[in-house]
Image (cartoon, rainbow, N blue to C red):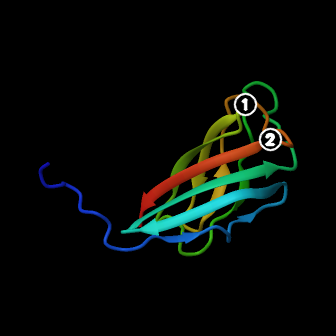
Amino acid sequence: MGASLYPPPTTTATVVTSGFTPTSGFTVNNFEARKVNGVCSFGLDLNVVTTISAGSSPWNLPDTVIGTLPAGFTPPRTYTATYGTGFADGEADITSGGTITLRSTNSFDITAGHTVRISGSWVL
């Protein structure tokens, strides 16, 4: 095979599995964030404790902060990610301070007992 366009990583990934701080109404099922070669990524599963209602037409959520990423694993500016529960899905914003906010839904409530799954990545 020919030469690779992308060299292999030259550093070991920094990985954390704790440090995500959920807001009231959520608990952490799983969390992992990693940094390697100037790229940061995370995956998060949150248990919904308190239902967030999508209301009536036009069926959207109030902007809802779900928690904060640990220092050192935050983006340089606000990035947008998608989330899903298996029923509800929509857009989330991740700020440079690490705050994650759910901003929209496909018209379904985010129901107590469901799991919000969200992941994202960015160049540091």
Mark 1 and mark 2: span between their CA atoms?
9 Å
Reply above or below: 76 against 108: below
Which residue sits at x=72%, y=26%?
58
Left/right of residue 97 with respect to residue 67 in the rendered view: left
* Residue 123 location (% of width, % of height): 40, 62
* Residue 67, quarter of the rendered image: bottom right
Q: Are marks 1 and 2 in contact (CB under 8 Å)?
A: yes
* Residue 88, quarter of the rendered image: top right
Left/right of residue 73 with respect to residue 63 in the rendered view: left
In the picture of the structure, the residue carrying the numbered disc 2 is 114
Which residue sits at x=66%, y=60%?
31
Query: Relative to the observer, which residue lies in front, 88 or 103?
Result: 88
Say what amino acid the circle numbered 2 marks: His
Q: Residue furthest top?
A: 57
* Residue 19 location (% of width, % of height): 67, 71
Which residue sits at x=14%, y=48%?
1
Point out which mark residue 102 bears. Answer: none
Which residue sits at x=55%, y=47%?
81
Left/right of residue 114 with respect to residue 41 in the rendered view: right
Say what amino acid the circle numbered 1 marks: Phe
* Residue 102 location (% of width, % of height): 67, 47
Reply above or below: 23 against 90: below
Point out which mark residue 87 bears. Answer: 1
Q: Residues within 10 Å of mark 2 (few under 14, many from 20)?
A: some
Reply above or below: 102 against 56: below
Of callouts 1 and 2, the N-terminal one: 1
* Residue 55 location (% of width, % of height): 82, 32
